[in-house]
Image (spheres, rainbow, N blue to C red):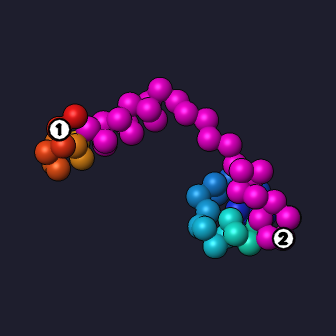
Amino acid sequence: MRKFVKDDVYISIKTLNTLCCVLGLQPGDVFEYIETQEDRENILDIINEEREVCNFEY
């Protein structure tokens, strides 16, 4: 819980597991993914770069 109080939102899977176990929650109860346009563009750029490297043809 100290991580949240200190605004350290980068937590490990182990910490998430512990938090969910102690509070009796699922990860979706703790986090909500809110996509921004910038996130979407960055993800699509990464996917397109991977396709080019692997020579995928769609």
Give SS at disc 1: loop
Give residue 21's quadrant in the image: bottom right
Q: What amino acid is at disc 2?
A: Val
Q: In the picture shown, does residue 15 fall above or below 8?
A: below
Name the foreground residue: 18 vs 8. 18
Q: Are marks 2 and 1 in contact (CB under 8 Å)?
A: no
Q: Residue at x 31, y 42 (%)?
A: 46
Give SS at disc 2: helix
Q: What amino acid is at disc 1?
A: Glu
Q: Residue at x 52, y 30 (%)?
A: 36
Q: Is the magenta region chiefly helix, strand or loop? A: helix
Which of the two discs, 2 and 1, labels the residue nearer the N terminus?
Answer: 2
Q: Position of residue 29 (x, y in %)?
A: 77, 51
Residue position marked by numbered label 1 in the rendering: 57
> Which of the labelled discs sits on residue 40, or is there none?
none
Q: Position of residue 8 (x, y in %)?
A: 64, 57
Name the foreground residue: 7 vs 24. 24
Q: Residue furthest front?
A: 58
Q: Nearer the viewer, mark 2 or mark 1?
A: 1
Q: Which residues are magenta?
A: 20-48
Q: Is residue 24 left or right of residue 15?
A: right
Name the foreground residue: 55 vs 20. 55
Q: Is residue 16 left or right of residue 29?
A: left
Q: Is residue 14 left or right of residue 35?
A: right
> Which of the labelled discs sits on residue 22, or is there none?
2
* Quadrant position of the N terminus in the picture: bottom right
Q: Position of residue 55 (x, y in %)?
A: 13, 45
Q: Residue at x 59, y 67 (%)?
A: 12
Q: Residues within 10 Å of mark 2 (few under 14, many from 20)?
A: few
